[in-house]
Image (cartoon, rainbow, N blue to C red):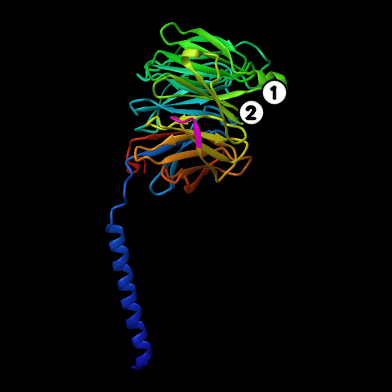
Amino acid sequence: MSRLPLALLMLFALAGCASAQSTEQASHADSVPHQDPGYVLFVGLESEDAVAIMDPQAGTLIRKIPIGISTEDIEGVHALDVSPDGEHYYLSIAHGWPYGSVWKMSTQKDSLVGRTNVGLFPATMAITPDGTWLFVANYNLHGDPQLDTVSVVHTPTMTEVQQIPVCTKPHGLVASNDGNSVYGSCTRDNVLKKISVATFAVVDSTNTLIDEDRAEGKVCYPAGLALSRDDQRLFISCHKRAEIRVMPTAQFGTVTNRITVGAGPYLLRTDPAGKRLYVPHRNDQSFSVIDIASEQVIATKPASASHPHTFAFGPDGKVFLSMESHAVVPGAVDEIDPETLETTRSVELGLQATGVGAVARPPSRYR
């Protein structure tokens, strides 16, 4: 029997050692536990009729949950709001027969808990701090100008109990932290409405326009709203004026400050500590951060994709920005360092990423 050359035998031996070492290293890597952040992100994909579940630690898409009834038409997942107890999240579905709807989903299982029809093209939503009432702005995007409504949904039974006539094309909504009021913005009328949670009725109304707007023939187009933690100041995103207007709730109708930001400020969010206001610039592929105490911009940063939509905040302090992007370019979520306000990661998720919310559940539960 022929013998293999010594050099070839040594080569095989070295290869065997390398293979064994590689196997040992892989085994060691597999044994190192993956750091679990203890929460996931739910992100609505409006042009895909789905909700994406994202692992914020790994920066990966875990899976997508199909949403909707029609197999032929895009129904449009628009807003996504997580319940105060974290057990459910709510989706506004923009299109329907003939109206839009709101879906209540379980955060523990990929399951629909309940749904109800609302008005034409439901856009943003606001949930009361006790989680009982969900207010839905019926934006009526494709309809003729008319007196549009805000729907009131009883979340335990998922029943629309009332439609409150408010204005033409309501869009922004925010619930007060004391649970007594909901504020709504009316884009085409340039007005604000204050709704009583106790009576489901409009109790106050004011205009967002100022003398300078009228003199220049310009509008505010209030697309989004936010409140300070003490409910004393209302922040209004003037989508067509590239500024945030500040209005004391005790002086409803008086603009006390105008904060210049990027083009197309959209759906505002205050951080959990109530110290900062985060502003997406939908027409500028960027975002601003405002110090609420001083009412000054502390940073303006670029976003990784176009049409920034809104923000969510992880329990570990991280900030996340959803971006719709455009056409067939996937929407994404940027992870933002709360200290430097720099984007540390961007994750593509699907077509037109809109509403986003953090849920305190380990990602392993969804794998």
Residue 302: image location, x then y, percent: 55, 44
Q: Is residue 232 left or right of residue 141?
A: left
Query: Badge 2, how many Cα within 10 Å: few under 14, some, many 20+?
Result: many
Q: Is residue 145 rendered to the left or right of residue 131?
A: right
Where residue 336 sits, quadrant-wise, is top left
Badge 1 is on which residue?
218
Tell me if residue 48 can be seen: no
Residue at position x 31%, y 77% in the image: 17
Q: Secondary structure at mark 2?
A: loop
State the mark number for residue 136.
none
Looking at the figure, which quarter contains the C terminus?
A: top left
Crowdedness of circle 1 by 10 Å Cα count: few (<14), some, many (20+)?
Answer: few
Residue at image position (40%, 41%) is 318
Residue segment shown in magenta:
293-297
Depth check: 241 or 122 in front? 241
Q: Give coordinates of residue 6: x percent, y percent.
A: 34, 92
Residue 237 drawn at (x, y percent):
56, 27
Q: CA distance from mark 2 to mark 1?
A: 8 Å
